[in-house]
Image: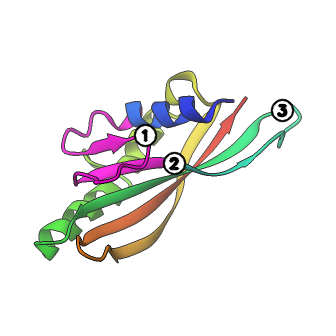
Amino acid sequence: MNVADIRTGIANALSSITTLRVYTSVPDSPQVPCAVIYPDTVQYGQAFSGEANVRMTIQVLTASVNTQAGQAELDGFCADSGSTSIPAKIEANPTLGGAAVSASVTEMRNYGVMGDTTRYYSAELVVDVYAT
């Protein structure tokens, strides 16, 4: 199991969302709309076959300057279907190009506005990954 490979697999799964920038490391100054992929937790050896349970977070940021447009865009990224749906892109490639046994978006959390000087609409999508 390699966390970097899982991040890359998620990024590749999201690459067909042409309006979304995807970061596999936390950027100093994100360009929105974007998705930032980072590990949340890793539980090693969770199955008899030695699989690890890796919980990844995809933090999605959109502009909040025009609140209706930013929120609508965020809603599209978090929806369970549609051309900009992050969960649908993960569902379409659950092995993340061979980096995982399976992966699925299991939760959305922390939906709202964040930031001090630059404000964004933001939500976190939790991806549960089983990998060997």
Residue at the image point whose x is 28% and y is 54% from the top: 29
The one of 49 and 5 positioned closer to us in this rendering = 5
Tell me, yes or no, whether the highlighted magenta stretch contains residue 6.
no
Q: Amino acid at mark 1?
A: Thr
Label the magenta part by its dominant secondary structure: loop
Q: Amino acid at mark 2?
A: Tyr
Q: Nearer the viewer, mark 1 or mark 3?
A: 1
83 to 116, vertically: above or below: above
Residue 38 x, y percent position in the rendering: 51, 48
Q: Nearer the viewer, mark 3 or mark 2?
A: 2
Residue 17 x, y percent position in the rendering: 25, 40
Q: Are marks 1 and 3 in contact (CB under 8 Å)?
A: no
Q: Which residues are magenta?
A: 13-37
Question: On the rendered structure, is 118 left or right of 65?
Answer: right
17 to 39, vertically: above or below: above
Mark 2 = which residue?
Answer: 38
Residue at the image point whose x is 51% and y is 30% from the top: 96
Mark 1 = which residue?
Answer: 24
The disc, 1 or 3, on the residue closer to the chain's N-terminal end is 1
Query: Dot 2, how many residues are within 10 Å of its Cα: few (below 14), some (14-19), or many (20+)?
Result: some
Residue projecting furthest to the right:
48
Provide the secondary structure element on which disc 3 rests.
Answer: loop
Mark 3 = which residue?
Answer: 50
* Mark-to-mark CA distance, 2 and 1: 7 Å
